[in-house]
Image (spheres, grey):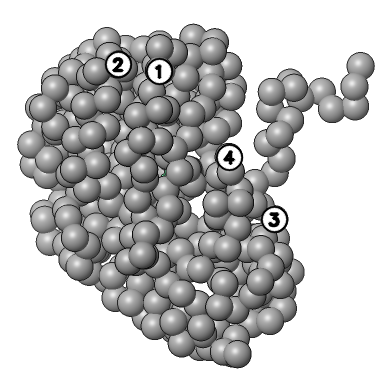
Amino acid sequence: MTNDPLVERMRAFGTTIFTEMSALALRTGSINLGQGFPDTDGPREMLDAVARSGPANQYPPLYGIPALRTAITGHERRFWGLERDPESEVVVTAGATEAVAAAILGLCEYGDEVVCFEPYYDSYAASITLAGAVRRPVTLRPGPDGRYRFDEGELRAAFGPRTRLVLLNSPHNPTGKVFTRAELALIAELCQAHDTYAVTDEVYEHLVFADAPERHTPLAALPGMLERTLRISSAGKTFSCTGWKVGWATGPAALVSAVARVKQFLTFVNAGPLQPAVAVALDLPDAYFTEFRAGLQARRDRLVTGLTEAGFTVLPSEGTYFVTTDITPLSDRGGADFCRELPARCGVVAVPTEVFYDHPEEGRHLIRFAFCKREEVIEEAAQRLSKLKP
Ligand SMILES: *Cc1c(COP(=O)(O)O)cnc(C)c1O
C-alpha cells in the first residue's frame, strides 16, 4: 500500500490555492481579495423569506420544490428569453459546483473529451478527472487591447471524434471576460458540426458591467443550441449567499435527467429550508439586479484605480467579481511568488492565475483580485496597494 490512499487520478489535486492564500491572509492580518465571496448579506426580501419559510426540514423533491423550479424557469424567460418546462427541464443542485460535477459524471464515458477554456474554474479539472474524461483546454490570452481572446484554429483543433461536450463559463472567472456573440456563434457551430453537448456555467449572468462591449448572451439562446445545452447557474453570486449552495441546471429533459440521476447518489437533495427564499430572490424586480451590478462596478473602478496607481497593467474586467492584472511592470518573478510576498509587502492577498491553467506558463505573469467586498475594504486595499509603487 502507498502512503496516500487517495485514488491516483486525484493526487495532482492538492489543497486549493484559496486554502493556502486564505490562511496567509489570516496569519498576516491582510485584506483577502483572493477568494471570491461577498462580505455583505444578500437582499432583505430573501433573508426574511428564510425566517418566514416555516417547517421545511425534511427532504424536498429530487428536482427541487415546485416554487423554486417555476421561479428558475420564469427568471430565464424574463432575462434571457429561454423557454423551459419547470416540470421536467430544471433540477436544483448543491450549488453550481454539484451541477457541473453531476453533468460531467452523467454525460461522459471514460476517455470522452471535454473542450474547455483555460484559465478555468478549479472544480472543472477535478470533475473531468473524477469522471475519467479528458480535458482539451483552449487558451484565453490577453490581446493588444487587454481583452482576452482565443485562437479560432485552436478551438477548431480541440474538437474531435471523442468530444462529448464543451464546458463554457461566461461571464468568465478568473479573467472577467464576457464571451462575445461572434465567439458564441463559433462555439455553437462547432457543437453542431461535431454533434456535442454544451454545458454552460453562468453563475455571473447578472454581472456584466455597463461599459462591457456586449451584454451577456446564454449559449442556449443561439439557434440550434436550446436542444443541446445544459445551462447552470446558482444563487450564490447573484444574491451574495455563497454559503447556501443553491444552484440549478436547466436544459432538455434528457440532459436534466442525466444530472438528476447522478445527483440522487451524490447529495440526493439539498438546502430544503433555503429553496423557498431563492424562489423569492429570483422574482425580485429588475432594480435589484441593476443596483447590485452598479454597486459592484463602482467597487471594481476603485480597485482598478488603486492597482493602476500601484503600477500593475490592469486588464479590462467586463464582468464577474474579478479583475486580473499583469505583474510584469512590478516583478520579473512569477505570480505565485509575487502573491506569497504580497501580504508582507502591503497587507493584501491575491491569487496567481497560473493555478487555473493546464499550461501554467500562459498565466505566469497574471494575478487575480476580487472586488466583491465592502466599499471601505476596497478603499483600504487600494491605499495599501499604492505602497507598491516603484
Ligand atoms: C463561484 C463559482 C462557482 C460555484 O458556484 P456554487 O454555487 O458556489 O457551487 C461555479 N463556477 C464559477 C465560475 C464560479 O465562480
Which quadrant is home to the N terminus? top right
> Counting other residues with Cα less than 10 Å from the Cα at mark 4, is it few (<14), some (14-19), or many (20 or more)?
some
Q: Are marks 2 and 1 in contact (CB under 8 Å)?
A: yes
Distance, label 2 to label 1, CA atoms, is: 7 Å
- Residue 335 image point, x, y percent: 63, 63
* Residue at image mark 4: 358
Q: Quadrant of the C terminus?
A: bottom right
Identify the disc placed on residue 20.
Answer: 3
For the residues labelled 1 and 4, the Cα–Cα distance comes to: 19 Å
Q: Position of residue 210 (x, y in %)?
A: 18, 66
| Residue 244 placement (x, y as % from top left) | 43, 44
The kind of residue on which mark 4 rests is Asp
Considering only order in the chain, which callout, 1 or 3, is on the residue closer to the N terminus? 3
Q: Nearer the viewer, residue 368 or 160?
A: 160
Q: For the residues marked 4 and 2, what is the alpha-carbon distance in whole angstroms?
A: 24 Å
Q: Residue at x 15, y 37 (%)?
A: 76
Where does the image place residue 269, in percent across and percent down from the top left?
42, 23
Q: Nearer the viewer, mark 3 or mark 2?
A: 2
- Numbered disc 2: secondary structure: loop
User: What residue is rendered at 53% in x and 88% in y?
Assistant: 386
Given the image, on which type of amino acid does mark 3 rest?
A: Glu
Mark 3 surroundings within 10 Å by alpha-carbon count, few (fewer than 14), some (14 through 19), many (20 or more): few
Residue at horizontal 19%, vertical 35%?
Answer: 185
Q: Secondary structure at mark 4?
A: loop
Marks 3 and 2 sit apart, C-alpha to C-alpha, by 40 Å
Going from N to C along the chain, the mark reached first, 3 or 4, is 3
| Marks 1 & 4, CB-CB < 8 Å contact | no
